[in-house]
């Protein structure tokens, strides 16, 4: 019974992946020409919407707090003081505040050059 469920799940996943694949197309354009057009659009979009990393929010207890000044997790909060133990810095992925607008500008640029974003041909 478990084997059938896995097979059905795998089949559904393959159908979703295959049916969702999309690509940029323009009749008569080579892959090199498309790559050059896309690069130009990406460079223009990067000028208009540069990469901006928003400051990461962090929790620092007040100086009068009795929490351990070393980096300690308490109640789901982290009281690292930035330097942390042995001079380490807080880690974590930063998001790019302009990523969505930059991607939209690239799509608009490619569309203005005559490209269409269509379902991939098999």
Image: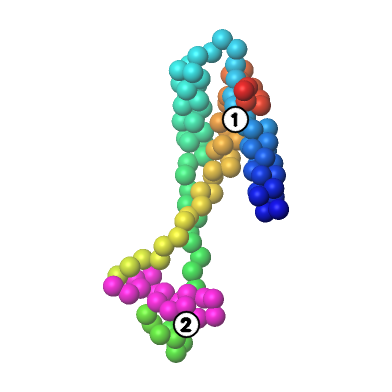
Residue 62, numbered label: 2
The answer to which of marks 1 and 2 sits earlier in the sequence is: 2
Q: Residue at x 51, y 52 (%)?
A: 95
Q: Which residues are magenta?
A: 71-86
Q: Secondary structure at mark 2?
A: loop
How far from the left and from the top, in percent, is residue 105? Answer: 58, 33
Q: How is the image coloured?
A: rainbow
Total marks shown come to: 2
Instruction: Name the side, left or right, on which 46 lies relative to 6.
Output: left
Instruction: Name the side, left or right, on which 87 lies relative to 20.
Output: left
How far from the left and from the top, in percent, is residue 39? Answer: 46, 26
How far from the left and from the top, in percent, is residue 93? Answer: 47, 56
Q: Residue furthest front?
A: 1
Q: Quadrant of the C terminus?
A: top right
Query: Considering only vertical position in the picture, is 36 above or below 55?
Result: above
User: Residue 9: in sight, yes or no?
Assistant: no
User: Residue 100: in sight, yes or no?
Assistant: yes
Residue 53 among those drawn in magenta: no
Q: CA distance from mark 1 to mark 2?
A: 47 Å
Query: Considering only vertical position in the picture, is 19 above or below 70?
Result: above
Query: Considering only vertical position in the picture, is 31 above or below 85?
Result: above
Residue 107, numbered label: 1
Q: Residue at x 69, y 41 (%)?
A: 12
């Amino acid at each position: 019974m478990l084997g059938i469920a896995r097979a059905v799940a795998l089949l559904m996943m393959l159908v979703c992946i295959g049916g969702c694949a999309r690509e940029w197309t323009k009749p008569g354009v080579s892959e090199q020409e498309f790559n050059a057009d896309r690069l130009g659009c990406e460079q223009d979009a990067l000028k208009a919407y540069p990469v901006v990393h928003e400051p990461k929010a962090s929790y620092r207890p007040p100086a009068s707090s009795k929490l351990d000044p070393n980096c300690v997790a308490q109640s789901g909060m982290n009281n690292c003081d930035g330097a942390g133990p042995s001079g380490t810095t807080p880690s974590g992925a930063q998001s790019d505040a302009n990523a969505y607008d930059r991607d939209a500008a690239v799509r608009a640029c490619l569309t203005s050059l005559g490209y269409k974003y269509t379902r991939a041909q098999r």
